[in-house]
Amino acid sequence: MDNQAIYDRLTEIFHDVFDDDSIVVTPELTASDIDEWDSLTHIRLVVSIERSFHLKFSAAEVGRLKNVGEFVELIRMKAAA
Amino acid sequence: MSNSLFTQMAWLPPAPSGFAAQCKAEVPAQESLGRHFQALAAHALDENNLIKLAKTIRKARDAGKSLAPLTPFRLGIISNATSHFLLPALEATAARHGIALECIEADFDQVMQEALSPESTINRAQLDAVLIAVDYRGLPLKTSAGDGDTAKASVVAALTHLNMVRNGLKRNGKTICIIQNIARPVEALFGGLDAVLPGTLRSLIDDINRGIAESILDTEDLLFDVAHLAETVGLADWHDATMWNMAKVPFASVFLPLYVDHVCRLVAAMRGKSRRCLILDLDNTVWGGVIGDDGLEGIVIGQGDATGEAHLAVQRTALNLRDRGVVLAVSSKNTDEVARGPFRNHPEMLLREEHIAVFQANWNDKATNITAIAKELALGLDAMVFLDDNPVERNLIRQMLPQVAVPELPADPALYARTLLAAGYFESITFSVEDKQRAGFYQDNARRVALQSQAGDMDAYLQSLDMVMTVQRFDETGRSRIAQLINKSNQYNLTTRRYTEVEVADIENDADCFALQIRLADVFGDNGMISVVICRHELDSWHIDTWLMSCRVLGRKVEHAVLDVLCQQAQRRGITQLIGIYIPTDRNALVEDHYAGLGFMPVDAPDDGSTVWQLPIDNVANSALPMAVRCIALDPLAEGVAHAS
């Protein structure tokens, strides 16, 4: 799966999870950029991504992530595995 | 596979693609906000969609708007786990069940403190009920494999703990408790022995669950049987260790919509909103096959046949529900006498006329019939559940009578009974002697009731089906299906003339025959070939030798569209009139007025009971049709595509 396809699908998921179609998903995006991105919404985001990509993340994998770019890298690696 | 019934809540129609926009859309002032939210909540919604709907509901409430006719309810939640994510899901789901729910949450893992302190958030909140959502990680459980005495003490300690919480809430908050029992963890220590030895985690939880159940009986508190729910969907899926470790989420969040739906069923039952009447379709729901076409010997019901047993399970479920007070009714597109036949004369039928309070078998639309049933039983439409295998009928009722619950059904009738029960329409919080007798109070020997005028705007509904009718002449591809329809159709069949496949081939090649096969597709899919017409050319007339149609597409104006095509084609061929004949049988009373309804004039009524009809071609005006009509190679000169809509 190429990066563009992942970003496209992530955009849909972000719009769904945060109920905000104006969010632009970039590699630099972090939780501090979106008001509603608190710890519970984070869980919902992770679960929504897991469901959409048919993947399962460990707590450590999710805990390490610093921004969306790293999340995309994680998805790419796991999807390829 | 069958698990998706529960995870997807497949008895609910899926959320429409523009759901987020629908949540945000302005509601016209004259429309009831409560009903609007209830309609949005009637879809299968995942967590993200539930949050969107909850936001909209909260906004309306915060603005002081009335949510009537939803019934207000205040629910407290105390839990040893993260419960914050339950709140919006509960509030949105409650609208599905007719409740305007407000949730008040205790602080994380403060179960005992909240219950015992009169000044706690929960106890000061004047709640209608409190959900005690404690799982095995929130109980003082001491395992002691093989040590019966210690095991007993541990069970008593856990039950005492829960009772202290309950009593604290009752004393301080004057509220009703909804107590969740314990979903067993997946991990077994010994294996089979876990269930044998006292004091294993498994044995302790089994004993505690029994103890909780016993402590509920004869109190006004309620049991939320989470143990059963978790087992139904699978414990391995239910318990998500990663999510617990990360955020103390007590079960896999994919089950959140299902979990909150079960809580809301209990809340709705407390407010008398459980449904009370099950309305059954007959053909391919109560039995396999079509009674009007297949006859008493042809329908499939009873032991020894997989399909027959599936439909038998539907009947058994209906009877079991009746035994606990649910009233049964029938709504079927059939001739009354024909529809009652199996109830009276089929030895394998479990359902009998005496079980059915109102029996509506006629050719009117089902919305009109269901309205009549509700009126006759003096029950609201919101007390009704309608079970029908046909997606078009289901959708019609959802659009025309949105208060009626209409479960989606899977293709396999083996899952009908399970799907009906999975939806929890008849959730009940008490059971009394009167309940056992209640269905009998409504009994009046399967009476019929007179119909008022047609319900709702049928034309708008038919338009919404996006029907496409395809008309073509007989050909080799269609031959065997044409022969099948000719030999099987009894009800919508004007002459009931039977032809073999060879004879059908002859008609195909006969220059004096104009014979059509007609297919119909709609938003729900392709219905396949649903009508056959054979005209024989004599002088300047077409004599309609055969006109038949599948009853599945009754009331969709297919016959009008077919007549339009016939007239067009007749005109192009210099034909001046159509001659139709109706030959009555004991099955086809349905089409007695077929030709009259299409504007034919009666010209003859021979002694054999048949009637002959005539329609001059020149003064036929095209009717407005709720469908597109595709004609394939009908034109005598060239292939053409006509649109009659």
Image: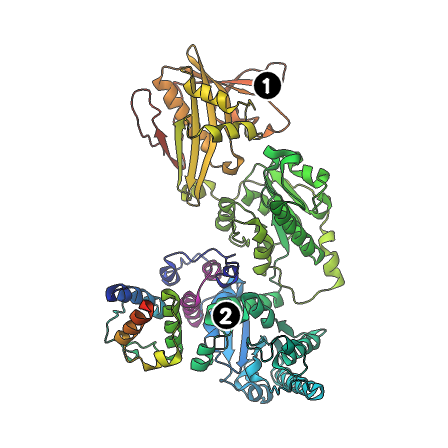
Quote the CA–CA distance across marks 1 and 2: 65 Å
**Which residue type does callout 1 highlight?**
Ser
**What is the chain letter for disc 2?**
B
Q: Quadrant of the C terminus of chain A?
A: bottom left
**What is the chain letter for disc 1?**
B
Q: Main secondary structure of the magenta part?
A: helix
What x and y, as percent, mark residue B277? 63, 53
Say left or right for B255 vs A71.
right
**Which residue type does callout 2 highlight?**
Asp
Can residue B286 be spotted in the picture? no
The answer to whether residue B521 is above or below residue B599 is below
Tag 2 residue: B237
Say left or right for B214 vs B183.
right
- Residue contact between numbered discs 1 and 2, judged by CB atoms under 8 Å: no
Q: Quadrant of residue B517?
A: top left
What x and y, as percent, mark residue B322? 69, 54
Q: Nearer the viewer, residue B537 or B580?
A: B537
Disc 1 element: loop
What x and y, as percent, mark residue B533? 47, 25
Q: Quadrant of the N terminus of chain A?
A: bottom left
Magenta stretch? Answer: B33-62
Q: Quadrant of residue B141?
A: bottom right
Q: Is residue B59 a member of the stretch shown in magenta?
A: yes
Q: Is residue B620 a member of the stretch shown in magenta?
A: no
Question: Which mark is drawn over residue B610?
Answer: 1
